[in-house]
Image: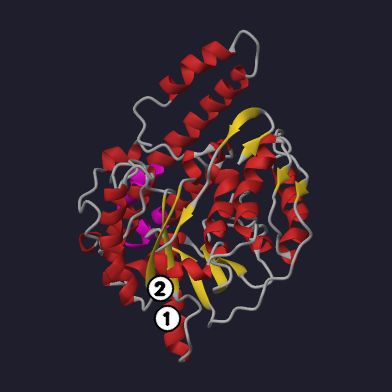
């Protein structure tokens, strides 16, 4: 990869088990998917020397239009850029039976996607939509921590087998390259996830990406029901799976699976295979299991919760406030006034801090005050659990 604004090149790569060598694509499809967010962020043309699938090529302008509309005010540097590639070519027909794959991190969203797929197939007496689970080293766990990724695979493999699916380890250095300049959450991770499956495009009939958000209208996000399907090709359909399903409902599915409760990995705070059990994501899962009476069954989490720490959790977005609000409803239904009180104090404290941070953000944009804002921000959040 070469850039217009700096000398030298970067080498991006994906690594699959050797038995998949014959199934890897020679097209530019995976590179379009993962590099388009970076090109839009840098404002540089994306020049590709390999042909692109015609469906994907026709969807690129629509993807760029959506991003620029979403972030016109918030991230005005994100803009539509030209994409230069050889004329699109229809993909050759696959000679082997084609399969469905899902991106699988071991988190709540991806476990729900896979468990629901297995349940649907069992009820209908049909073949599951998802046959393979692609677990990516280099996204949540850094590529520099191979032992941690191996530990995660050891934990996830029995769960995959219990769901009747094959776990496939994949590695990529995307997040170690300049790709990291594209905002992972808001813009880049949907394309990164899609690119992993599109690399196996000749083999896959569909690629399933677990949805993050439940509330409509859906929050602007890197993986979104409006943009993920636009990364489909003529041979591989990208499916945004589970949009609109409440997280508490997803966790009901997880709690009903002993295999999932032994393998759940919701936290990437420390970049390892363990849940830290002291961040907003971990407390969300722990509190949900606690009010359901299931926390003791989740062997990857602490089985006790310090509700004083819960009160100090800073919920960085309105989406998290809604998620904690869901658990508050469950807690009150279960007669857990102690948990409900802690969550309400957490939400109230977060809203006070958000008001102060808005003032800090205003100061950060004013000449002469930005240094004060830089000083104040960490002090506003001092003592918060994040």
Does the residue at mark 2 contact the one at mark 1 (Cβ under 8 Å)?
Answer: yes
Q: Nearer the viewer, residue 152 or 168?
A: 168
What residue do we see at 55% from left, 62% from top?
199
Q: Main secondary structure of the magenta part?
A: helix
Q: Check disc 1: other Cα within 10 Å, few if <14, some if 14-19, many if 20+.
A: some
Q: Quadrant of residue 256?
A: bottom left
Q: Secondary structure at mark 2?
A: helix
Visible residue check, residue 322 = yes
* Local secondary structure at mark 1: helix
Q: CA distance from mark 2 to mark 1?
A: 6 Å
Which one is nearer the viewer's eye here, 236 or 362?
236
User: Percent position (x, y) of residue 155?
Assistant: 26, 62
When asked about the image quadrant of residue 276, the answer is: top left
Residue 273 seen in render: no
Q: From the image, which quarter does the N terminus lie in?
A: top right
Residue 337 included in the magenta stretch of the image? yes
Residue in the picture at 62% in, 54% down: 33
Q: Is residue 63 left or right of residue 10?
A: right
Q: Is residue 335 above or below residue 5?
A: below
Residue matched to label 2: 115
Disc sitting over residue 375 in the figure: none
Mark number, residue 119: 1
Q: Compared to 314, does 162 lie above or below?
A: below
Q: Which residues are magenta?
A: 327-344
28 inside magenta stretch: no
Question: Which residue is more in the foreground, 323 or 126?
Answer: 126
């Amino acid at each position: 990869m070469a850039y217009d604004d700096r000398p030298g090149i970067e080498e991006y790569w994906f690594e699959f088990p050797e038995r998949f060598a014959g199934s890897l694509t020679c097209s530019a499809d995976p590179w379009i998917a993962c590099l388009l967010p970076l090109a839009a962020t840098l404002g540089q043309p994306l020049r590709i020397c390999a042909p692109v699938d015609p469906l994907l090529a026709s969807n690129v302008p629509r993807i760029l239009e959506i991003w620029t509309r979403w972030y016109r005010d918030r991230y005005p540097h994100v803009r539509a850029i030209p994409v230069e590639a050889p004329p699109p070519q229809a993909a050759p027909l696959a000679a082997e039976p084609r399969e469905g794959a899902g991106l699988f991190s071991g988190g709540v969203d991806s476990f729900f996607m896979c468990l629901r797929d297995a349940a649907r197939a069992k009820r209908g007496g049909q073949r599951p939509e998802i046959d393979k689970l692609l677990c990516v080293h280099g996204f949540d766990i850094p590529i520099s921590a191979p032992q941690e990724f191996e530990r995660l695979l050891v934990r996830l493999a029995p769960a995959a087998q219990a769901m009747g699916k094959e776990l496939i380890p994949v590695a990529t250095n995307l997040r170690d390259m300049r790709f990291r300049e594209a905002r992972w959450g808001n813009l880049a991770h949907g394309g990164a996830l899609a690119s992993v499956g599109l690399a196996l495009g000749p083999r896959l009939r569909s690629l399933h990406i677990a949805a993050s958000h439940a509330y409509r209208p859906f929050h602007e996000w890197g993986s979104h029901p409006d943009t993920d399907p636009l990364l489909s090709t003529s041979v591989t359909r990208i499916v945004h799976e589970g949009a609109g399903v409440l997280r508490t409902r997803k966790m009901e599915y997880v709690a009903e699976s002993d295999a999932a409760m032994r393998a759940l990995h919701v936290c990437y705070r420390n970049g390892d295979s363990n849940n830290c059990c002291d961040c907003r994501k971990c407390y969300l899962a722990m509190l949900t299991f606690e009010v359901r009476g299931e926390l003791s069954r989740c062997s990857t989490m602490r089985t006790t919760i310090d509700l004083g720490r819960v009160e100090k959790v800073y919920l960085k977005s309105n989406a998290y406030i809604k998620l904690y609000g869901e658990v508050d409803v469950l807690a009150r239904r279960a007669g857990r006034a102690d948990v409900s009180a802690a969550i309400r104090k957490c939400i109230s404290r977060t809203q006070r801090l958000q008001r102060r941070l808005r003032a800090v953000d205003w100061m950060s944009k004013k000449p002469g005050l930005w240094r004060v804002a830089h000083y104040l921000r960490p002090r506003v959040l001092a003592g918060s659990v994040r």
